[in-house]
């Protein structure tokens, strides 16, 4: 890194002067250990770019004014090539891009090499939600992490390619079906930050947004313990609602009567549903259970058979809680 | 006008009554089955500008939807189709064939002092393939459109329910159209240069077309094969890219970018060629550093094959691969920078006329500088990880593709328009529209750099609150841009009917296409040439009688009068 004075100067020139949280005209807050380095290189390239841009545009404007066409006057005689000059403006950019490449590669090495003591969280992307599995088996739809501790993400996809992107951390990694990809970061400040899907994945690509919650020192473990026991500590309806929210159901099913990718769940229990082949059924516990475990078995007419199976991904008590939650969606509660 | 000016011994003078290629043969069939490169060029021009209009409508719908977060005028599925169609139509139907097939077809043989391209039938076949490919694309739009993004990434593209097969077959056929044009141009440039036109006496636009043609011929087959594999997987269930069938989705990205990155240079190299012509003519001065500009085109064409992996820095490819592709990527920056400096040096001590084509040159230098420099952020590994797949990338490639290629295309169109149709357009409206396009473009896309570096991912139907103002500014910019284009369409079409007749050489250019009438006769030239320096502008002088430029010594470039026609 260069001296802070020069860095400051660069930043002022390029309107990139960072605020206290590291954010600037160009960049979101810096919340990971690598963010500062990335921003430094960004500002370095920005300074070079602004310099060259001004050089080009100022020269252009001066030439247009100074050498403007005047009636009856031809262009002055001037050489039509100059080897030394041309070699110079070939060489200078060449040196600069080599420097940029080296800084970029060094920064990338830091970003792609996790420390060996990192805390591991499993990530799964599916259309169109994220799920994060903690070492004790607990699954959440947001990414909770402790501050100041390296976190390693091991990521897989259920269906198509997704990409995990946290602008505040400056990290992005594709989540590819059929293989595991890895990413790591160390958050530097508690707070809540956006986590986006950056690889186009269909209808609700832009809805595939989660949050990263960075917990202050000591609070992450307490949160994890409390969150993990939700089946015991919550009523079945509340636990069901939580599962509904964190396990990706709400991406496709509304609870307010509007149809999304799947049918709404408002008033689902006891409702008559019609299937593509014309048969009907009255929704009961068994139908809901079957639809969760074998979603393609009976598809409500007007909808595509696109729901992934939850076989092996939800336990019996969890399915029970979800059914209880659906029962509560009878239009009398103040849900949504 | 020039009818009463017989003093130009032998030089074909722009006479309104003289038969031109436009009047040689009547009726729609005389156009559709013509072998005349000029008519094929004009048909391509109509076809690609129609595609540009269609792609532009999709773009405006996308921008309008993004006026507000959440639904504005359409559903998420429609939005996904709109941005896909915008990309696919603009890339495959407009910008790849754009300059070579429309302007290149018209200008290339004329610049060589030739009567046609080397293989006129192949040329017509190319146009017909384009038409068939376009029909496939339009049919797929009608039967349910495509929602994959123009990149067709697997496994999304092999699993989505939209009309992917017909669209990819369309692109496959369009690829052949592109290969035919490239092949034709290579042969024509090798075999049909006139006496005296050595490789380094060729107009630089031809260097641009030549290096483009090399990429078209070498890279396009890869796209064809890749898309066929995609169709095979979708239609026959052969596992190539889909992991559930034992395939590898990232393999598709390698194949796709192995074509599509060189394709970026198919788009920009001819644009650079146009700028090289225009900057010299409107600076009234010999191009500066001819050999560096010519070689840099070839260098870009060669390097373009070695950088595809920079689209995949976050795909999970190995760190070593990323490092190599990052390093190679920067190699492309050098020849581009060299060209920009040489263009600037051409203006130095010139006699600069700010006619509409030159306004597009200035616009190009401004916008392409930004487009090129922002590429540095994306070539560097650590910054690209943050910026990849955000609006920063969207802004970057629009600055290069639109700010570069489209602006140069417009410059070229305004430059060769008098030659194509024998009419001058309104200079004032030309300037107004050039300004609107410039302002609208910057408002539309500069805002997207800021959104992108703040983390706004691309292809998003909804967005988080903080981006609202920038999105709205961008949308307003797109309306200004559209206004600029409507004005342009207005005065260009108006000029066809009411425009002043164009002189043979309205701008004072020294290349051979200006040595015939405007518009040229069917046979192009009645002379064979002994070509001189294409940038020897001082061999010309302004002739007030014709309001055009004439050679001080008309015989200096003539090899023989009365060519075989």
Image (tube, rainbow, N blue to C red):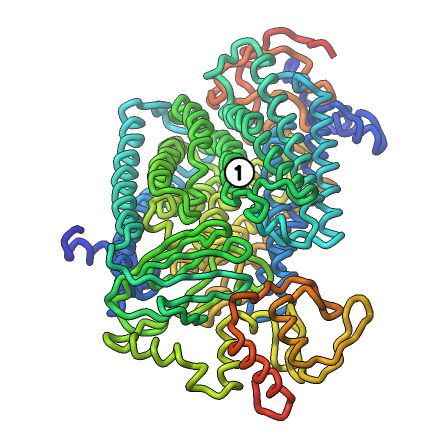
- Relative to A166, B198 lies left or right: right
**Residue at 36% across, 39% down:** B326
Residue B385 x/y as whole percent: 37, 51
The extreme top residue here reads: B560
Determine the secondary structure under disc 1. helix
**Above or below A203: residue B27:** above
What chain does badge 1 belong to? B
**Residue at 48% across, 46% down:** B397
**Above or below B100: residue B155:** below
Q: Which residue is mark 1?
A: B260
Residue A73 visible at all: no
Q: How many marks?
A: 1
Residue B199 visible at all: yes
Category of crowding for the residue at label 1, using alpha-carbon neighbours closer than 10 angstroms: few (below 14), some (14–19), many (at least 20): many
User: Which residue is more in the foreground, A268 or B338?
Assistant: A268
Position of the C terminus of chain B, as image quadrant, is top right
Residue B6's image quarter?
top right
User: Which residue is more in the foreground, B72 or A173?
Assistant: A173
**Above or below B301: residue A52:** below
User: Which residue is more in the foreground, B429 or B216?
Assistant: B216
Residue A313 x/y as whole percent: 51, 67
Position of the N terminus of chain B, as image quadrant, is top right
User: Which residue is more in the foreground, A215 or B463?
Assistant: A215
Residue A239 x/y as whole percent: 49, 82
Residue A88 x/y as whole percent: 27, 29
The extreme front residue here reads: A316
Residue A225's image quarter?
bottom left
């Amino acid at each position: 890194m260069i001296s802070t004075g020069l860095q400051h100067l660069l930043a002022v020139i390029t309107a990139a002067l960072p605020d206290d949280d590291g954010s600037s005209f160009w960049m979101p807050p810096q919340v990971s250990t690598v963010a500062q380095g990335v921003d430094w290189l960004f500002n370095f390239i920005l300074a070079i770019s602004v310099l060259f841009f001004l050089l080009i545009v100022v020269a252009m404007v001066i030439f247009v004014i100074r050498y403007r066409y005047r009636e009856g006057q031809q262009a002055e005689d001037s050489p039509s090539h100059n080897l030394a000059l041309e070699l110079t403006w070939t060489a200078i950019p060449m040196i600069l891009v080599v420097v940029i490449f080296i800084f970029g590669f060094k920064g990338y090495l830091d970003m792609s090499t996790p420390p060996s003591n990192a805390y591991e969280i499993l990530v799964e992307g599916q259309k169109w939600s994220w799920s994060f599995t903690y070492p004790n088996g607990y699954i959440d739809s947001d990414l909770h992490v402790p501050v100041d501790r390296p976190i390693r993400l091991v990521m897989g996809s259920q269906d198509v390619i997704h990409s995990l992107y946290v602008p505040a951390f400056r990290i992005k990694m594709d989540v590819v079906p059929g293989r595991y990809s890895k990413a790591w970061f160390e958050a530097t400040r508690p707070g809540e930050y956006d986590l986006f899907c950056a690889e186009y994945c269909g209808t609700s690509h832009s809805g595939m947004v989660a949050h990263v919650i960075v917990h202050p020192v000591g609070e992450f473990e307490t949160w994890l313990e409390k969150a993990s026991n939700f089946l015991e500590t919550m009523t079945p309806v509340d636990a069901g609602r939580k599962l509904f929210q964190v396990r990706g159901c709400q991406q496709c099913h509304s609870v307010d009567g509007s149809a999304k990718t799947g049918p709404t769940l408002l008033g689902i229990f006891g409702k008559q549903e019609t299937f593509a082949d014309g048969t009907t059924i009255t929704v009961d516990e068994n139908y809901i259970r079957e639809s969760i475990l074998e979603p393609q078995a009976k598809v409500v007419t007007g909808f595509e058979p696109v729901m992934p199976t939850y076989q092996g991904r939800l336990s019996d008590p969890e399915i029970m809680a979800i059914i209880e939650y659906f029962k509560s969606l009878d239009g009398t509660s103040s849900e949504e | 006008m020039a009818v009463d000016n017989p003093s130009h011994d032998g030089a074909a003078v722009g006479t309104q009554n003289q038969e031109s290629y436009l009047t040689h043969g009547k009726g729609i069939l005389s156009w559709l089955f013509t072998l005349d490169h000029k008519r094929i060029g004009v048909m391509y021009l109509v076809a690609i500008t129609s595609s540009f209009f269609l792609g532009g409508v999709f773009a405006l719908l996308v921008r309008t939807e993004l006026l507000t977060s959440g639904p504005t005028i359409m559903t998420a599925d429609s939005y996904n189709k709109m941005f896909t169609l915008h990309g696919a139509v603009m890339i495959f139907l407009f910008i790849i064939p754009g300059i070579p097939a429309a302007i290149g077809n018209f200008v290339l043989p004329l610049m060589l002092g030739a009567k046609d391209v080397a293989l006129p039938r192949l040329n017509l076949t190319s146009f017909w393939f384009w038409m068939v490919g376009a029909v496939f694309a339009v049919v797929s739009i009608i039967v349910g459109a495509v929602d994959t993004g123009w990149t067709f990434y697997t496994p999304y593209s092999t699993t989505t329910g939209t009309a992917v097969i017909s669209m990819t077959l369309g692109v496959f056929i369009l690829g052949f159209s592109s290969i035919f044009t490239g092949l034709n141009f290579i042969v024509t440039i090798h075999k049909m240069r006139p006496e005296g036109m050595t490789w380094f006496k060729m107009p630089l636009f031809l260097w641009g077309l030549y290096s483009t043609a090399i990429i078209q011929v070498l890279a396009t087959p890869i796209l064809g094969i890749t898309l066929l594999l995609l169709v095979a997987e979708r239609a026959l269930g052969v596992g190539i890219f889909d992991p559930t069938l034992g395939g590898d989705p990232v393999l598709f990205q390698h194949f796709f970018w192995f074509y599509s990155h060189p394709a970026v240079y198919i788009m920009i190299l001819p644009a650079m060629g146009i700028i090289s012509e225009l900057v010299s003519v409107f600076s009234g001065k010999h191009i500066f550093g001819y050999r560096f500009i010519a070689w840099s085109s070839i260098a870009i064409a060669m390097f373009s094959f070695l950088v595809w992996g920079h689209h995949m820095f976050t795909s999970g490819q190995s760190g070593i691969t990323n490092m190599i592709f990052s390093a190679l990527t920067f190699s492309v920056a050098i020849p581009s920078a060299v060209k920009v400096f040489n263009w600037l040096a051409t203006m130095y001590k010139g006699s600069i006329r700010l006619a509409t084509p030159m306004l597009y040159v200035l616009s190009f230098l401004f916008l392409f500088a930004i487009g090129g420099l922002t590429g540095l952020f994306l070539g560097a590994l650590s910054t690209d990880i943050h910026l990849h797949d955000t609006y920063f990338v969207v802004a970057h490639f629009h600055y290069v593709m639109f700010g570069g290629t489209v602006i140069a295309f417009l410059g070229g169109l305004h430059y060769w328009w008098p030659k194509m149709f024998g009419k001058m357009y309104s200079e004032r409206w030309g300037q107004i529209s050039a300004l609107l396009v410039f302002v609208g473009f910057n408002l539309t896309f500069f805002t997207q750099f800021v959104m992108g570096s703040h983390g706004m991912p691309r292809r998003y139907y909804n967005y988080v609150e903080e981006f609202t103002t920038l999105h709205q500014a961008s949308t307003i910019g797109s309306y200004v841009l559209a206004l600029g284009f409507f004005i342009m369409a207005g005065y260009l079409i108006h000029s066809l009917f009411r425009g002043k007749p164009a002189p043979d050489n309205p701008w004072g250019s020294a290349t051979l296409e200006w040595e015939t009438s405007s518009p040229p006769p069917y046979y192009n030239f009645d002379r064979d040439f002994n070509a001189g320096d294409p940038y020897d502008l001082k061999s010309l002088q302004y002739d007030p009688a014709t309001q055009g430029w004439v050679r001080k010594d008309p015989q200096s470039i003539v090899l023989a009068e009365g060519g075989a026609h």
